[in-house]
Image: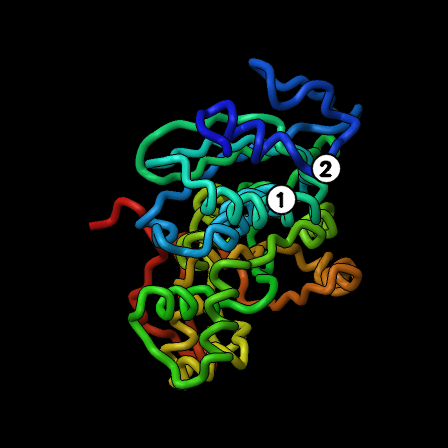
Amino acid sequence: MAKNEFDLIAHYFERQAVDRRDVNLAIGDDCALLTVPEGCQLAVSTDSLVAGTHFLADADPALVAHKALAANLSDLAAMGATPAWVSLALTMPEPDETWLKGFCQGFFALAEYYNVQLIGGDTTKGPLSITLTVQGFVPQGQALTRSGASNGDWVYVTGNLGDSAAGLALILGERHLSSEALTQTLTLRHYQAQPRVLAGQALRGIASAALDISDGVMSDLGHILSRSGLGAVLDVDKLPLSDELLAFEPDEIKARQMALTSGEEYELCFTVPEANRGAVETALAHTGVKACCIGQLHAGSGIALQSNGQPLDWQLHGYDHFAE
């Protein structure tokens, strides 16, 4: 049985299926040594998940691991990058080997799917939290950023919106459904959202700006607008809603408001110049991911909402960790 920090690392984290040729030295030394492909830039992102804030302490550790890694891979997807490496800093109150076994099962399953190698990190004692740093490659000068949008560009989102918020409400016990199947489906859509890695790569050279939806469209699109110095009009009738969300919330107004504010979706929100609109569907065809146009950018600031061509006075906000 693993007993100390080094036993835990050796027993649970050094054994993995992914063994990349660009990793020259990984777990077991003071630093990892890595090789970046010629002609590529290195994309790096760090996220933390804290028990009680991002997941319940008694949640299935395999689902927690998937959510943690997916959230980080989604940042790479938003830049159009190809995932390569990840480091993990894990803080635990006690070395719970049952929890670690489940965590590693979920973590390495997703890492193997995207050919991501764990290259190092840290374990320490304290309140349960997970911090991941992911690295990936993007061809020189082709990264999707938040600042590239222009007046007149169209606003798109991938997938459906709102399912994650519905799943979270069920996880927290704020809502209860008679259908166990629907409850399980929406719960897993919160914990097992799929990062849109292939979609992000396909949108290089087509999208003018992009990010992933981690705090809700109303919040995240605002980052593109701020960095690009523009405003936007969104048509709420064009928001993509799943049948499961509408079964959870039959009131379409409330369902659309959920779609605009639901965080941890890890879909992509991106903008496309008029000249590239015809290329979006073709570019995404091989990814199995749909995209819907939900609005357009304009000179100005902020996000205006409309339905049937009429303005809406919905006071909506995305998630903010430090909001009162």
The residue lying at 72 percent from left, 39 percent from top is 17
Q: Is residue 228 above or below residue 253?
A: above
Taking 257 as reference, is 84 left or right? right
The residue lying at 73 percent from left, 30 percent from top is 140
Question: Which amino acid, mark 1?
Answer: Phe
Residue 203 seen anywhere in this rendered image of the structure: yes
Q: Position of residue 242 (x, y in %)?
A: 54, 76
- Disc 2 or 1, which lies upstream in sequence? 2
Taking 49 as reference, is 16 left or right? right
User: For the residue labelled by badge 2, is the local secondary structure a helix, a strand or a loop?
Assistant: loop
The residue nearer to you, when weighing 275 against 188, is 188
User: Residue furthest toward the left?
Assistant: 324
The residue lying at 20 percent from left, 50 percent from top is 324
Circle 2: is it few (<14), some (14-19), or many (20+) Cα within 10 Å?
some
Residue 93 appears in which quarter of the rendering?
A: top left
Q: What number is the disc on residue 18?
A: 2
Q: Is residue 137 above or below residue 323?
A: above
Q: Is residue 231 above or below residue 130?
A: below
Taking 60 as reference, is 127 left or right? left
State the CA–CA distance, disc 2 to disc 1: 9 Å
The residue lying at 39 percent from left, 85 percent from top is 178
CB-based contact (under 8 Å), mark 2 and mark 1: yes
Circle 1 is placed at which residue position? 108
Q: Position of residue 299 (x, y in %)?
A: 48, 53
Q: What number is the disc on residue 279?
A: none
User: Residue furthest toward the top?
Assistant: 30
Q: Is residue 298 above or below residue 176?
A: above
Question: Which amino acid, mark 2?
Answer: Val
Residue 87 appears in which quarter of the rendering?
A: top right
Q: Position of residue 170 (x, y in %)?
A: 37, 70
The residue nearer to you, when weighing 58 against 198, is 58
